[in-house]
Amino acid sequence: MFFAAILLHGLCLANAVNFTTVYEWDEFDFIWPSGADSSHGQIKQNFKSSKVYLDYMAVFGERLFLSIETQSAVPATLVWLPTSGASTATPKLAPFPSWNLHEKDNCDSIQWAKGMETDTDGRLWVLDDGNKKCAGKLWIFNLVNNDTTERVYQFPDTVVSHSFDKRWLHDIVLDKTQDDYLAYITQVSSENIIVYSRKTENSWSVKIPGVRISTLALSTKSEARQLYLGRYGSKELYSVSVSELKKEGGNATGRLIGKWTARPYRMLIDSANVLYAAFNYQSYTSKRNNSTPFHEERFHEVGQLGAGYPFTFALDANGSFWMTERNETEFGIRHKLLKAEVGARSYLYNTSTDLPLRG
């Protein structure tokens, strides 16, 4: 059994992908606004790099977007970085789309950016969990039209509670249909999937009885689409047919697929229908092929990382897998931005026919 375990570990490492380090930070900093605005000077003075917790990631063209947990010591909750640059210096965080949309307790600004996704038409979709004063929203930005705000949708109280203590907006994935974009959204620990239609500008809730959801991922367009669900506080992986999510106020049936080695907090599917997952307090990420019986393989592994949520990741349109890595030790906090070529794109693309969109 001992030698079998060693062999299995060796096979896991053999399947791992080689990542290159793009950037490393011991401390983050922002691109601060110029001028004599005293309010921004006070914000800069109060900023603490140790309070920057990276939550979610999306990529479009030469830009990488990150959401940051809202903190009094963090001035912006949605930022971007260049994917490459002429300088070897680590880039500073740039508020997206500008400082003007990061005014705390102003409900016309972004309060707490959570899950995000870029679509194939060049839009950035961002969940905003709001705060005690501001209700939850969905922001849609047009990245190919000077980052303009295309739409701000406030969820009705009947779909997403306007009480901050009763909601916890989390993940978002996008389903491009023949004439619409549908967003599937989760709230942590809820049994409900929130569905939003861009065409009708309407939202509704579908219940998955018995499955309290933590994270989700959407399968490729090449099959009868399935929404994969990580069960809250559990290693279990479920799936539900998206056809069951298009009826307002109904129920859908969750089907148990298998069990991961740990509890997933982030999942992602590529255009080859491979599912990737990151886990609480684990220094590795895993993958599985959705077209075969459940089998987990190690995707990336490092030494011990002292963080509850050590990774966040995204795929771009050109086959690159981007991932941040957080390590907390007694000597401080270190972040890395990693990149690997995996030969597959986001689940929104069809591998054989869709051309990559460069922004």
Image (cartoon, rainbow, N blue to C red):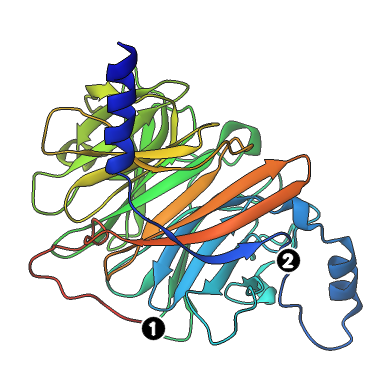
Which picture quadrant has residue 52? bottom right
Q: Which mark is residue 103?
A: 2
Q: Earlier in the sequence, mark 2 or mark 1?
A: 2
Residue 75 drawn above or below residue 310 = below
Residue at figure coordinates x 28%, y 74% from the top left: 121
Q: Position of residue 169 (x, y in %)?
A: 51, 42
Q: CA distance from mark 2 to mark 1?
A: 25 Å
Residue 125 visible? The answer is no
Location of mark 1 (residue): 144
Q: Position of residue 104 (x, y in %)?
A: 74, 60
Residue at figure coordinates x 43%, y 78% from the top left: 62
Residue 259 drawn above or below residue 80 = above
Quadrant in which the C terminus appears: bottom left
The residue nearer to you, when weighing 36 against 259, is: 259
Q: Position of residue 263 (x, y in %)?
A: 44, 27
Query: Contact, CB < 8 Å: mark 2 with mark 1?
Result: no
Q: SS at mark 2?
A: loop
Amino acid at the residue labelled 1: Val
Crowding around mark 1 (Cα neighbors within 10 Å: few <14, some 14 to 19, many 20+) is: some
Mark 2 vs mark 1: give the one in front.
1
Q: Position of residue 152 (x, y in %)?
A: 49, 64
